[in-house]
Amino acid sequence: MTPELERKAIRHKLERHVAASARARQLFAAGDHLLVAVSGGPDSVALLYVLASLVQAKRLTLSALHINYGLRGEESEEDARFVSRLCADLGIPLTCERIDLSRVPSQRKGMSLQTRAREARYAALRRAAAAVGAGKIALGHTADDQAETLVMWMLRGSGAAGLAGIRPVRDAVYVRPLLDVSRTDVLTYLSAKGVSFRMDSSNAKPLYLRNRIRHQLLPLLKQFNPAVVDTLTRQADILRDDDRCLEQWTSEWIGRHVQRGDDRSLAVSRMAVLELPVALQRRVIRRVMQQAAQSPYSPTFGSAEAVLEKIVRGRSGSSLALRGASVVREYERVRFFPNRTAGRHAGGGVSDRAVSLCLSVPSAIVWPPTEHVIRLSYAPASDGTGMPTGTQIARFDADRFTHPLVVRSWKAGDVFHPQGMGGRRKKVQDYFCDIKLPRERRAGVPLLVAPEGILWIVGYRTDQRFRVMPSTRRILVAEIVPVETSRKGKG
C-alpha cells in the first residue's frame, strides 16, 4: 500500500469510528449545530478535523471557540494565532475569548487556579454557544483523559459516581466524540493528515496531580498491563451504568418520600432512610442536602456520613451545620434547611429572641421568625357560626375577651385550654411535646393572646374558652397568610 493510500485508510478508519460511536451514544444528530472547543492541542485539533469530515454526511454546522488565559505569555498568543489560521483553513467561524483568571471570583473557598479556569471555560462555552445558536458543545477528551481521571479519583477514594469518570454526554449539551479514542490514535490520525498542532508546556510540568499521573503513574501501570487505558475506559463504562441505575432508584425514592416545607426545608422519615441499603442511604442524604442547599455541587462523602451517624442514627434534637445546608433531627423526621434560613429553625437567628407585637382589629402584622402575615378581622355571627377552624384560620367569640391583643412568642409557664379537651388546662410546653414539635422550632410559633388568656397557638390549636357558640354575636377571624400572598394583594 502506498503512503497516500495508507494515510487515507487511517483517516477514514478513525472518522468512521467516531461517526459510529456518536451514533451509538447519540452525541449529535443530522442537522445539529456544534460549538467545538479548540485549544490548539492535538486532541482538540483532531476533534475539529474529524467533525469537519462529517459535516456533509451529517449536515452539521460547526463553530469554534478558543479561550486565551494569557498564562503562558507569548506561547498563549501563538496558540490563539494558530487556532485562528486552522479555523480559517477549514472555513469554520471562530470566536476567541480572553479570560483574566485574576478577575474570576472563586465560587467556593479554597478553589484552585485549575478549577477556576475550568469554571470560567464552561461559562465561556455556554455564552459562545448561545451567541452562535449551537445546541451542542463538543469537547476533545480522549480515552487517556478518561484513564487519568479514573486513577485520580481512585487515589482520592471516590465512590461509583467519581469512578464513572468523564461522561460522553453531560446535561444533554456537552458531548465528547473522542472519549473512546486513545491519544496514540489521535497522534497517528494527525500525522496521517499532515496536520500540525500546539503543545501546552504546562502539561509537562509535575505541578498538578493529573500531570504526575499522566507522565509517571500511567507509564508504570502500562508495565503491568499494556492495555491499561482500554481497561480503565471499560471500567468507567461499567461503573457509569451502575451509577445511573443507583441514581434512578435514588430519584424515585426521593420523589416518594421527601416533603417540601413552606420554609424551603426538606423533610424525610428517618426510618424510611434506615430501611434503605447503606449505599442508597448515602446517595439519598447527599442528594437531599444538595437540593436543600440549591447547589450544583454534591456534598462530600464525609458530610453524608456525618449526617447519617449524628442525625439519622443520632438523638432527637441533634443538629449539624454543613456547607450549604443544616440538618436537624425532629423526633422521627430529619429536616434539611438551606443555611441562609436554617438559623431561624435550627438553634439560631431571630426565632431565638422573644417577639411581642400588639394588634388592633382589623389589622395585619408580619411575624418575623417565619415571615408569615397574621391578619385579624371581625365578621358577623352569620358568617362563621358552626364553621370549623383549621391550621390556617381560626374563629373566636369576640365578646369573650378584651383588648389589647398581642401576638408573641411562648414562654415558660404558658397554659391554655385546648379545644376538644373538655376544658382541661394544659401547659403549652407539654402540648408542644405531645405534637412532637422540635425545640428548635418552638420559639418561632406565635401565640395570639388576650388579657384573659391564650386564644390560639397560631397554626396549631385554639383555646376552647373562646370558641364560637350559637349565642355568639360577633366573631374575630384570625388567619395566617404567606407573605408573598399578602404582597400580591397589595399590588
Image (spheres, helix red, strand yellow):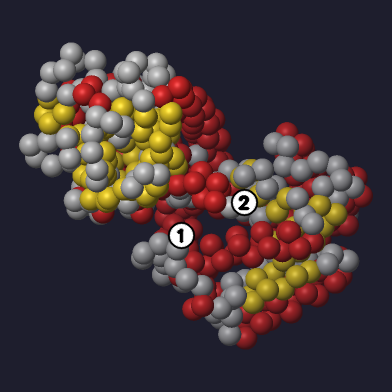
Name the residue nearer the viewer: 9 or 2.
9
Q: Position of residue 153 (x, y in %)?
A: 41, 48
State whether residue 186 is above or below residue 470. Answer: below
Q: From what the image shows, is residue 328 above or below residue 343? A: above
112 displayed left or right of 183:
left
**Total number of numbered labels?**
2
Which residue appears at 42% of the width and 55% of the height? 217
The answer to whether residue 396 of the structure is visible from this angle is yes
Q: Nearer the viewer, residue 197 or 323?
A: 323
Position of residue 332 relative to residue 28, above or below, is above
Q: State the residue at coordinates (77%, 55%).
A: 134
The disc, 1 or 2, on the residue closer to the chain's N-terminal end is: 2
Front residue of this view, candidates 44 and 248? 248
Q: Secondary structure at mark 1?
A: helix
Q: Amino acid at mark 1?
A: Arg
Label 1 environment density (alpha carbons within 10 Å; few <14, some 14–19, many ≥20): some
Which residue is the site of mark 2?
Answer: 142
**Looking at the image, can residue 154 be seen?**
no
Relative height, residue 291 to residue 66 (above, below) = above
Q: Position of residue 115 (x, y in %)?
A: 47, 63
Q: Mark 2 packing: few (<14 Cα in 10 Å), some, or many (20+)?
A: many
C-alpha distance separating marks 1 and 2: 14 Å
Residue 457 in percent (x, y) is at 25, 33
Residue furthest to the left: 413
Residue type at mark 2: give it: Thr
Residue 482 lies left or right of residue 368; in this view the side is: right
Identify which residue is drawn at 79% across, 61% down: 132
Q: Which mark is residue 210?
A: 1
